[in-house]
Image: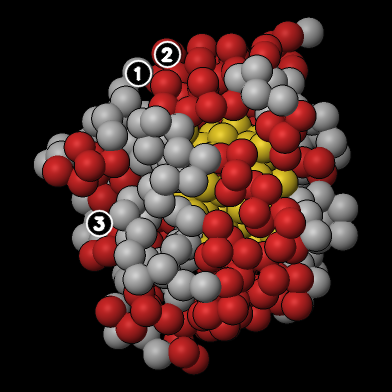
């Protein structure tokens, strides 16, 4: 049973953290082989499930320590049909691994959830194409059809919502939103941006949100930005008008490098955790509606703890 599907606690004024960059932690720090960044395959490897469980519990501990809520994203960013087939998963196996990924997060939720630290479970949806360079763009109808199977797998689980992470163009986000609405699940859309603050297809954040909201009657619960450093998008959202209030979450990269530079990098750039935490503090000062704060590529528990130390209501008391 989903705890919060009918009333998402992150729609309040309370502050929530997320985990860091799951795939980069598992690949670069723990040494797991992750072809295509397909972290869901760890669910079917010896010790893989244990590694994921320990990873998510780390963030449960941080939430409890700093008195913050936590949004847990399932390790299913690549668990859709095209990417799954590349790892040898047919439709039935993909549906099963998506469901098991949610059940795994329930263990952390059961341990750490409390009135002061609500633990929200999100079924993570990734783009059909490359997360940095959109190609073979779909129209909204095709995107809805493609992503429906994965969202259907989340429907009868403990997932409180669906989050579409690293969206690169509006039409795919529209399709995912409609697919989630069909099964009456809340949905969050997270766009990624380039160093100019625009989506990889050249659309501005303002226009992308307008397009999705117009096409879906503002169905997304809120929007996020992920897989970019704050220096890449701060000017795009500061002092830009009421539309920015639709953005409630940020999952930032540790590195200041562009997507193209990150693609070419042979080692992990883990940036400066303290600097990242201070940048989140400044964003919160100017945009107090931002209340879902976390990491993406290159970040780990150090970066999230730095965010906790600058933004925690417990430390502010």
Write the residue at 76% across / 29% down. 242
Say which mark, if any, is on residue 209.
Answer: none
Specify the label residue 32 is tagged with.
3
Front label number (3 vs 2): 2
- Disc 2: which residue: 275
Where residue 201 appears, as percent x and y from the top left, is: 40, 51
Residue farthest toward the top in the current orientation of the protein: 317
State whether residue 176 appears in this view.
yes
Q: Which residue is mark 1?
A: 272
Q: Position of residue 180 (x, y in %)?
A: 70, 70
Quadrant where the N terminus is found in the figure: bottom right
Q: For the residues marked 1 and 2, what is the alpha-carbon distance in whole angstroms?
A: 5 Å
> Residue 162, image x and y in percent?
65, 62
Q: Secondary structure at mark 2?
A: helix
Looking at the image, residue 106 sits to the left or right of residue 22; the answer is: right
Name which quarter of the figure residue 63 lies in: top right
């Amino acid at each position: 049973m989903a705890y919060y599907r009918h009333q998402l606690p992150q729609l309040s004024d309370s502050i929530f953290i997320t985990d860091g960059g799951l795939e980069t932690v598992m690949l670069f720090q723990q040494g797991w082989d992750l072809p295509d960044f397909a972290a869901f395959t760890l669910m079917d490897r010896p010790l893989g499930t244990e590694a994921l469980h320990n990873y998510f519990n780390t963030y449960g501990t941080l939430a409890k320590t700093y008195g913050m809520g936590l949004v847990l994203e399932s390790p299913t960013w690549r668990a859709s049909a095209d990417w799954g087939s590349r790892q040898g998963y047919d439709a039935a196996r993909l549906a099963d691994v998506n469901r098991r990924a949610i059940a795994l997060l329930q263990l952390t939720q059961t341990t750490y959830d409390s009135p002061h630290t609500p633990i929200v479970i999100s079924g993570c949806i990734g783009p059909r194409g490359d997360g940095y360079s959109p190609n073979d763009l779909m129209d909204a109808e095709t995107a809805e059809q493609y992503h429906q199977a994965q969202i259907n797998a989340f429907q009868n689980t403990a997932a409180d919502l669906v989050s579409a992470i690293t969206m690169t163009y509006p039409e795919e986000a529209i399709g995912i939103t409609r697919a989630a609405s069909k099964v009456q699940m809340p949905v969050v859309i997270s766009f990624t941006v380039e160093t100019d603050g625009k989506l990889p297809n050249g659309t501005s954040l303002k226009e992308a949100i307008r397009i999705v909201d117009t096409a879906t009657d503002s169905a997304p619960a809120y929007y996020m930005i992920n897989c970019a450093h704050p220096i890449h998008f701060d000017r795009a959202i500061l002092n830009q008008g009421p539309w920015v209030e639709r953005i409630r979450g940020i999952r930032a990269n540790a590195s200041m490098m562009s997507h193209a530079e990150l693609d070419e990098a042979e080692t992990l750039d883990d940036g400066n955790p303290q600097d990242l935490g201070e940048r989140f503090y400044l964003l919160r000062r100017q945009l107090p509606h931002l209340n879902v704060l976390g990491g993406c590529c290159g970040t780990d528990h150090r970066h999230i703890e730095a965010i906790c130390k600058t933004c925690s209501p417990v430390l502010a008391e």
